[in-house]
């Protein structure tokens, strides 16, 4: 693994060098005063092809298209110490009105940079809390649609075995998987949910092998917490639930639906706050949940016809209960066992 | 139980395929005296170029061929640095990995844009050799590239140990001065070895994108190149042992993914670490008798 981290380090250094060279001279500080747009900078640890960062990036792009912001970003900052430098340089030179990004592994660096520039609002993806006066946090709180997906999965399985292939047992992964399991148990108390981890955020070939192992073990419905699982489901012809964004296009016949995260409610709320001068360091969790449109089920693309009608009715009723606040999906961040 | 074992053997062959290709590629490089740490990036570039060509042309075999050429290009670049210029092989190899990784990601974004849904193709389907046998039919229902990988083992063995080229290759990796004195162009031979090696690494990477997944994403190689660097030492630079090494790693990987689902009350990390632990153990045992190509890591400069 040391070779890998060394490699990551070199990649990071090279890419940062390239990006900084590319960004030089882009700053035009006086421009936005005339247009009334606020200047937003995105700071991402991974390439924006990464699904989590991709959702945040998409919401910022949408805000730019809507004429709300002027958006620049740096991606692939990595986890080897560059985050704090990038944030400090941006804060000094571009002086953005708002910085959005993902903290997680760079948690301490982001918090140091935020403390050093208390006049700039920082809005970061994080598992930890907000810091007054200027660090607000968010995360993908999509356990509610994960629960609904689980309900459908429970109704679809004939073998009473469902397989989940997940990345690494961190809280944000665990609460999705646990909610999915709880949902499946609600519609099908007999169901067994198998869970395995690939110990990596990106290794689709291993995820696919893991998914094939689930199918061999009798699973006839899968939850693709990670990329690679849908491919296995399509190959073997079993139903599968996607994650994070609508992945139906990969296997239109087999991807039923799945939790979708939408960052636009969060971003629009923060932009309004910044414009009004009322930015508050808070946990923005609610804006990534069902009631405010931050979490939804993906479009069925016609596959709802394959789901038993009574299950669909139950899901719709549960969806309404969640929206109206009458049902709260339990948040369980403990590591799920292998057999549930 | 029988099904369980058949299932594991079939998975083992799938997991081992990219490792066989790339480790055989590394074998050519190292037998010629060049440690090619560009392997990870070359596989990644192979996965990218193979997928892209398959996607644009509509032919999976055009994809494989393009990955082969892409890998050759990467091997040739490595030869410019490590053979012609005599740059430190660790540095030039890591440099090639950085370059090919970045080129692939850049090319991917230029060609396919920033879609949230990965562009995909219909990958190779598995080819059943014994469709009527329940056991052999299941095991030998594999991708064509898997059969090619296995067929390459005796071919590479023959090339390395039974041909003139193989003799020169081995001698240039052990004693380039003597080889040069015998009238053989050391630079040219090492360049050819790196180009062949790169081609095999590229195809190994393309297996992931055009056979196993039908899509390309960053992180698709996920350190498999580094595993091959360990496997080549385990194999003592012998093609047949490359097969055993790749199958050993593949079988433990296939086993662990099934053990995770049995509900044995052990941390999953233990299962995930198993293939690496076994590889390290095997390497420790086999590595004691490792006989490195004597000129490995030494740039050759003609006096």
Image (cartoon, coloured by chain):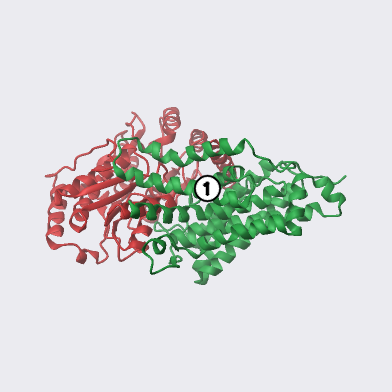
Chain colours: A red, B green
Residue A227 placement (x, y as % from top left):
39, 53
Above/below status of A133 relative to A184? above
Q: Nearer the viewer, residue A136 or A109?
A: A109
Q: How many marks?
A: 1
Residue A15 placement (x, y as % from top left):
56, 45
Residue A167 placement (x, y as % from top left):
37, 44
Above/below status of A113 relative to A300? above
Give the structural element (helix, strand or loop) at label 1. helix
Give the residue at the far bottom of this rendering. B58
Q: Residue at x 71, y 41 (%)?
A: B297
Residue wearing tag 1: B224
Specify the subunit that label 1 lies on: B
Task: Using the rendered view, name the quadrant where residue B236 is placed.
Answer: top right
Work out whether residue B259 can be spotted: yes
Above/below status of B273 relative to B4? above
Q: Residue at x 56, y 42 (%)?
A: A16
Work out whether residue A93 can be spotted: no
């Amino acid at each position: 693994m040391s070779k890998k981290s060394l490699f990551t380090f070199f990649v990071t250094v090279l890419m940062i060098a390239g990006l900084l060279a590319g960004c030089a001279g882009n700053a035009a500080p006086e421009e936005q005063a005339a247009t009334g747009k606020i200047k937003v900078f995105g700071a991402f640890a991974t390439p924006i092809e990464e699904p989590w960062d991709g959702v945040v990036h998409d919401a910022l792009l949408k805000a730019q298209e809507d004429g709300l912001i002027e958006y620049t970003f740096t991606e692939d900052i990595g986890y080897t110490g560059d985050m704090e430098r990038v944030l400090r340089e941006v804060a000094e030179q571009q002086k953005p009105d708002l910085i959005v990004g993902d903290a997680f592994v760079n948690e301490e660096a982001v918090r140091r940079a935020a403390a050093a520039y208390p006049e700039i609002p920082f809005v970061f993806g994080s598992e930890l809390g907000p810091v007054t006066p200027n660090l607000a946090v968010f995360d993908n709180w999509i356990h509610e649609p994960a629960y609904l997906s689980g309900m459908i999965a429970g109704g679809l399985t004939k073998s009473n075995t469902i397989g989940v292939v997940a990345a690494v047992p961190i809280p944000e992964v665990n609460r999705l998987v646990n909610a999915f399991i709880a949902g499946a148990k609600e519609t099908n108390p007999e169901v067994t949910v198998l869970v395995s981890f690939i110990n990596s955020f990106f290794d689709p070939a291993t995820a696919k092998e893991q998914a094939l192992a689930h199918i061999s073990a009798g699973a006839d419905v899968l939850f693709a917490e990670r990329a690679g699982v849908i491919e296995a489901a399509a190959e073997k012809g079993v139903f599968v639930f996607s994650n994070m964004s609508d992945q139906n296009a990969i296997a239109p016949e087999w991807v039923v639906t799945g939790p979708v995260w939408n960052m636009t409610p969060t971003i629009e709320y923060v932009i309004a706050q910044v414009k009004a001068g009322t930015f508050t360091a808070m946990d923005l969790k609610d804006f990534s949940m069902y009631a405010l449109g931050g979490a939804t089920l993906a479009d069925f693309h016609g596959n709802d016809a394959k789901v038993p009608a009574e299950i669909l009715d139950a899901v719709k009723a549960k969806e309404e209960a969640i929206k109206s606040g009458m049902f709260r999906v339990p948040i369980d961040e403990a590591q799920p066992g292998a057999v549930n | 139980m029988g099904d369980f074992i058949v299932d594991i053997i079939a998975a083992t062959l799938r997991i081992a395929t990219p490792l066989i290709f790339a480790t055989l590629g590394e074998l050519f490089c190292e037998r010629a005296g060049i440690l090619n740490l560009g392997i990870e990036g070359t596989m990644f570039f192979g996965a990218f170029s193979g997928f892209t060509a398959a996607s644009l042309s509509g032919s999976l075999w055009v994809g494989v061929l393009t990955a082969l050429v892409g890998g050759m290009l990467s091997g040739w670049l490595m030869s410019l640095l490590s053979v012609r210029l005599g740059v430190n092989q660790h540095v030039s190899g890591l440099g090639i990995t950085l370059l090919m990784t970045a080129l692939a990601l850049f090319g991917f974004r230029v060609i396919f844009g920033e879609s949230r849904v990965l562009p995909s193709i219909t990958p190779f389907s598995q080819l059943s050799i014994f469709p009527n046998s329940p056991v052999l039919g299941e095991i030998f229902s594999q991708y064509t590239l898997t059969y090619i990988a296995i067929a390459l083992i005796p071919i590479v063995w023959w090339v390395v140990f039974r041909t003139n080229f193989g003799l020169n290759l081995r001698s240039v990796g052990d004693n380039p001065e003597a080889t040069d004195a015998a009238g053989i162009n050391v630079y040219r031979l090492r360049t050819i070895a790196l180009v062949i090696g790169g081609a095999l690494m590229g195809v190994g990477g393309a297996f992931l994108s055009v056979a196993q997944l039908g899509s390309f994403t960053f992180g698709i190689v996920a350190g498999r190149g580094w595993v091959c660097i360990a496997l080549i030492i385990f194999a003592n630079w012998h093609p047949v042992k490359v097969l055993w090494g790749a199958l050993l790693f593949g079988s433990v990987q296939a086993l662990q993914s099934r053990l995770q689902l049995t509900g044995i009350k052990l941390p999953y990390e233990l299962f995930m670490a198993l293939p690496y632990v076994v590889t390290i153990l095997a390497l420790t045992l086999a590595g004691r008798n490792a006989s490195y190509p004597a000129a490995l890591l030494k740039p050759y400069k003609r006096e």
